[in-house]
Image: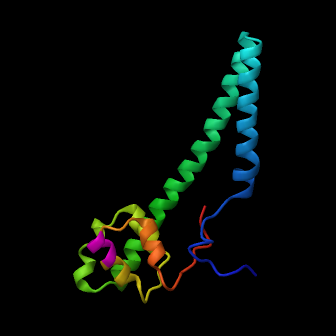
Amino acid sequence: MSAPQTYATHRRFEPLHHFILLPFFLITAVATIYTFVRRPALATFWIALLALAVLALAVQVRVYALKVQDRLIRLEEQLRLARLLPEDLKARIPELTVKQLVGLRFAADSEVAERVREAFQENLDGEAIKKRIKIWRPDEFRV
């Protein structure tokens, strides 16, 4: 069983993506560009271009996954906040940014209203909100 999630440990790396595929595609792109520079030809140019396209595709796939995740977090947190916040804060839920909602998802139900109030009063971003959380609510289903 893993240790409880905290601010210090909440970042997630996907080993296959971050430590194998991206480095492999990056090294391949650099190597093929180097080869093209050393031996310019249509074939080496095309291979370098293909390597760059594959690297760009790998990055874009990750970006798309994170955008979908942020949309889901936004929806989940808006529903959660509508259930948990006092009336004076419920009307302000649409004012929260996606980054703020992403930060608030880690706050336990018992302290989320306090974190929302601070976010509005001090214009806190997601990282600042996460740093103030006292009771961490882990999110193990992230991309």
- The answer to whether residue 76 is visible is no
Indicate yes or no whether the magenta region holds residue 8: no
Q: Is residue 10 left or right of residue 1?
A: left
Locate the N terminus by quadrant.
bottom right
Question: Picture coordinates of residue 123 (x, y %)?
Answer: 30, 67
- The answer to whether residue 16 is visible is yes
Question: Picture coordinates of residue 134 (x, y %)?
Answer: 48, 84
Q: At 70% from the left edge and 51% from the top edge, which residue is drawn?
A: 17
Q: At 63% from the left edge and 71% from the top edge, which residue is drawn?
A: 9
* Colour convention: rainbow
Picture quarter containing residue 40?
Answer: top right
Locate the C terminus by quadrant.
bottom right
Q: Which residues are magenta?
A: 118-122
Q: At 73% from the left edge and 10% from the top edge, which residue is drawn?
A: 41
- Vertical placement of residue 124 versus 114, above or below: above
Question: Picture coordinates of residue 108 (x, y %)?
Answer: 48, 84
For this orientation, the residue located farthest to the top is 41
Q: Is residue 47 left or right of residue 117?
A: right
Q: Total marks drawn?
A: 0
- Vertical placement of residue 53 versus 21, above or below: above
Magenta stretch, main secondary structure class: helix
Between 98 and 8, the residue placed more toward the observer is: 8
Question: Picture coordinates of residue 76 (x, y %)?
Answer: 44, 71
Indicate yes or no whether the magenta region holds residue 120: yes
Q: Is residue 45 left or right of residue 73?
A: right
- Vertical placement of residue 91 versus 51, above or below: below
Between 81 and 5, the residue placed more toward the observer is: 5
